[in-house]
Every structure is written in structure tokens, then in C-alpha cells.
Amino acid sequence: MSDQDSQLAPDDPQPDDRFVTVRGVRLRYADWGDSGPLMLLLHGDMRTARSWDAVARDLCDQFHVLSLDSRGHGDSDWPTTGYNFAQRAKDLEAFCDALNLRNVLGVGHSTGGVVMSLLADTRRDIFERLTLLEPMVTVNEKFQRMVSTRATSPRRTWGSRPELYDYLKAHRMTGRWREDVIRDVVAHEAVKLPDGRLDMKWSPDSMKWSEREGDYLDLKPIFRRLDIPILFISSEGRADGFVELDPVMAELPDFSMLKIRNTEHNMYMNRPDAISWAINAFVQGQEVSGTI
């Protein structure tokens, strides 16, 4: 690591890197230590297990926190296929079975929240409760066509970690991330290419149209079937997009919704302290709702 790179490396506690092979795919996960009930964190598209670092550091004194790199992300294998929701849920099921994870406190962001919800619907023994950070409630062709363009769009690369840091700090959205989160991303979510430049750790195959075509869903019926407590967290910038859940919350006593001020979709990177507080309060059985 160069002197410039070392100046950007976080000096906070780091997790242990662990690997397990399931369904022919080697999955990497971060293990923050055995300090209590099991909690599993699952990221969304184009992020990795290490995007959760700030949240994990807040929670690892009270919970045994594991954070998984999904296939095609981070330091897990990057196969060319297997990225529809059903296959991702099978990956997660196989991961939980391989580690004998039961009655887990699940925390999923975006696509990670969708995958956890799908698995909870078919395997009632794995999750005790779910905290869902803006999973897509309905996914249709329009949405999948939109996100699939990322598979073929030119990828931005950076000449060094300081250059990536400066880019993230100046960007309209990532510049709102907390400082330690930006440093974690620079240190752990970027990979050096053969030409020496840096790229982010996600496979374009995970977004391609052949994996997205026909992969549509509606989570509302699943939420109504699940007999576990669910906390649905939305960002202030996107809360209006989840009004379709109002009837679900009215019908289900164990379904609550929380809005986080001054955040966008990656809210746990904007305000990890607020997300950590909400997760902990929810797990402890406190009422968590409204806006914070």
C-alpha cells in the first residue's frame, strides 16, 4: 500500500474474512465476532459486505454480525449467471444452511432486502425478524430495463485510491456519506485492475438484461404472509415511493415503517448511526416508527 493509500485506510476495528462454497460459488463474508444473537447483513446491487462497516461496528458489541458478499460482488466469485431473485435467494438459503444459521436477525438493503424477504417466505426457520432498507416492493419490466443499462454503460475507473476518495467526496450523492463510510468504500469496495487503475467490486453480469428479463415481483403478498416482525426503513428522499405499503402497515400489527431524515437510497451510508439505533431498538422490541 502506498503512503497516500495508507492515509485513507480506516484504522477502526476490522472483521475477519471468511469463505464458504455453496452451489458451486465461493462466497466471502465478513465476521465481526461472536458477541450475541446472530445478525446477517445483506447489501444491494453494486455494493459489497464492506458497505455495512460503520453499522457493523456500532452493533458488533451486542450481536454476532455477519455481512455477506453476494455472488458477483465484493470478494465472492463472479459467475456469468445466477442473478435473478430466485437464484439469489437460493444462494442465501445455501449460505445459511452451510453455516447452520437459524432464527437470524436479518437486515437487507435494496435487492438484499428483496432476497431476504423471498427466503423468509419459503424458509420460516431462518429469520426471526427482518429490517428492510428500501427493498423494491414491486419490480416490473420498466424497472428491470432501467437497471439493466448499467451492464453495458462505460465503467468509470480511477488512477488511485486518493483519486477515488476525491471523486466520492465531490459527488452529489456519495459526498453525503459519512466520512468513515467513504474511507471504508475506498479501502474495501475498490479493486485494482491489471492496468493499475481501480474499479468498483461488482460484476456487470449481475445487471445484464438476460438475468433481468421476466424477473418481476410484488412483495406485498409476501409481507402479509410472513408471521414475523418487520421494520421497513425508507429514506427521506424516497419515502413517497412507498405509499403502497400504507395498507400493509395498517393490516399487520408487526409491520412498522420508519423514515430517516437527510438520507437517500443508501441511507445506512448517509446516517449509519441512525440505522444502527433503529435496528437495535427494533430487535429489543421497542416501537420504531415515524421519522428520525
Image (cartoon, rainbow, N blue to C red):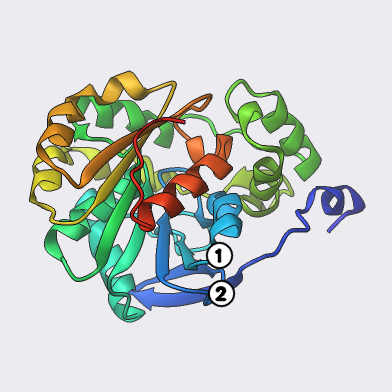
| Frontmost residue, 270 versus 50 | 270
Q: Is residue 177 above or below residue 74?
A: above
Question: In which image quadrant can residue 219 be found?
Answer: top left
Which type of secondary structure does the marked residue at label 1 adopt?
Answer: loop
Res 60 seen here? yes
Q: Residue at 80% x, 47% y: name it.
A: 8
Total labels: the figure holds 2
Amino acid type, residue under disc 2 in the picture: Gly
Q: Is the residue marked by circle 1 packed among few (<14), some (14-19), or many (20+) residues within 10 Å?
A: many
128 vs 165: above or below: below
Instruction: Give residue 92's position: percent from left, percent from top.
Output: 30, 64
Q: Residue at x 8, y 42 (%)?
A: 221
Q: Could you say where residue 227 lies in the image, as x and y percent from the top left?
A: 13, 56
In three-dimensional space, the C-alpha distance between marks 2 and 1, rounded to whole angstroms, equals 7 Å
Residue 35: x %, y % from top left: 53, 74
Q: Report which residue position mark 1 lands on.
A: 60
Q: Are marks 2 and 1 in contact (CB under 8 Å)?
A: yes
Q: Residue at x 28, y 77 (%)?
A: 97
The circle drawn on residue 33 is 2
Among the 4 quarters of the image, the one containing residue 138: top left
Quarter of the image where one finds residue 91:
bottom left
**Residue 285 percent location from the top left of the image:** 33, 55
| Furthest residue toward right | 3
In this rendering, the answer to whether 141 lies above or below 21 is above
Sequence order check: which comes first, mark 2 or mark 1? Answer: 2
Q: Nearer the viewer, residue 12 or 61?
A: 61
The one nearer the camera, 248 or 204, is: 248
Residue 215 placement, left or right of 99: left
Instruction: Answer whether residue 82 is visible to the viewer in this image.
Output: no
